Image: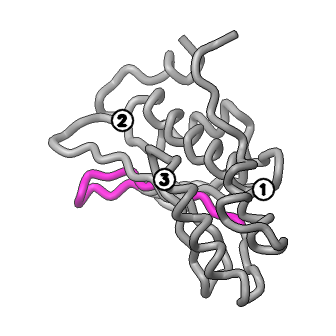
């Protein structure tokens, strides 16, 4: 059991409190914006990702948004959209979209906790790992499409393949 798991054994723990503890444990820069929202900067292999998690008690959903800058030339936007579709076909949790006006690529993920379900540190950790893993996996492909002459299919084929099993 990790230090984070040991510190949470009450069902009354707010999901953002768990996220804050995970961020402290990993020594990530973060800002607790309000009771229901936290923003973090997480250094990846390719770049620093901005991650925001927010809790919506109204629909009992913990929302994760992971962003990075993405403003390709206009003539590459269609091929980038095709690449996002191909990447989304390979993502079982969460999906990519692009906020064109903000010039951001976005990975979104929602954890529904309807009926009074409680988020566990393991679930939240899995959300964070999934988001960062997808961004790290597909970032090079998005770069090849957005600023290179690669087709979406060729660029996605260079994305780091998911490994199953063990050697």
Image coordinates for residue 23, horizontal then vertical, percent:
64, 40
Instruction: Choose the circle earlier in sequence order: 2 or 3.
Output: 3
Front-most of residues 113 and 3? 113
The residues colored magenta run 55-68
| Crowd class of label 2 (few under 14; some 14 to 19; many from 20; radius 10 Å) | some
Residue drawn at x 53%, y 34% is: 125
Residue drawn at x 82%, y 73% is: 149
Residue 65 seen anywhere in this rendered image of the structure: no
Q: Is residue 153 magenta?
A: no
Of the residues tagged 2 and 3, which is closer to the observer?
A: 3
Q: Quadrant of the C terminus?
A: top right
Give the residue at mark 2: 119
What numbered label is drawn on residue 89? 3
Q: Is residue 64 magenta?
A: yes
Image coordinates for residue 25, horizontal then vertical, percent:
67, 30
Q: In the displayed structure, would residue 55 be above or below residue 150? A: above
The Cα atoms of the two marked residues, 1 and 2, are separated by 32 Å
The Cα atoms of the two marked residues, 2 and 3, are separated by 26 Å
Front-most of residues 98 and 25? 98
Residue drawn at x 76%, y 73% is: 146
Q: In the displayed structure, would residue 13 be above or below residue 65? A: above
Image coordinates for residue 96, horizontal then vertical, percent:
54, 62
Residue 150 seen anywhere in this rendered image of the structure: yes
- Tell whether 133 sits left or right of 93: right
Coloring applied to the structure: one colour
**Secondary structure mostly taken by the magenta-highlighted segment of the chain:** strand
Disc 1 to disc 2: CB gap under 8 Å: no
Front-most of residues 63 and 18? 63
Give the residue at mark 1: 140
Front-most of residues 84 and 96? 84
Q: In the displayed structure, would residue 80 be above or below residue 34? A: below
Of the residues tagged 1 and 2, which is closer to the observer?
A: 1
């Amino acid at each position: 059991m990790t230090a984070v798991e040991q510190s949470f054994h009450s069902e009354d723990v707010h999901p953002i409190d768990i996220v804050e503890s995970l961020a402290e444990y990993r020594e990530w820069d973060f800002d607790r914006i309000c009771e229901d929202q936290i923003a973090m900067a997480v250094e990846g292999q390719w770049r620093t990702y901005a991650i925001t998690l927010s809790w919506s008690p109204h629909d009992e959903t913990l929302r994760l948004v992971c962003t990075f800058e993405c403003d390709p030339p206009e003539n590459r936007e269609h091929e980038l959209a095709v690449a996002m579709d191909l990447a989304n076909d390979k993502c079982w949790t969460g999906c990519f979209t692009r906020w064109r006006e903000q010039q951001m690529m976005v990975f979104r993920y929602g954890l529904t906790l309807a009926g009074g379900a409680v988020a566990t540190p393991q679930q939240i950790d899995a959300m964070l790992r999934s988001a960062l893993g997808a961004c790290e996996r597909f970032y090079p492909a998005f770069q090849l499409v957005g600023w290179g002459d690669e087709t979406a299919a060729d660029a996605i084929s260079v994305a780091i393949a998911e490994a199953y099993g063990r050697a």
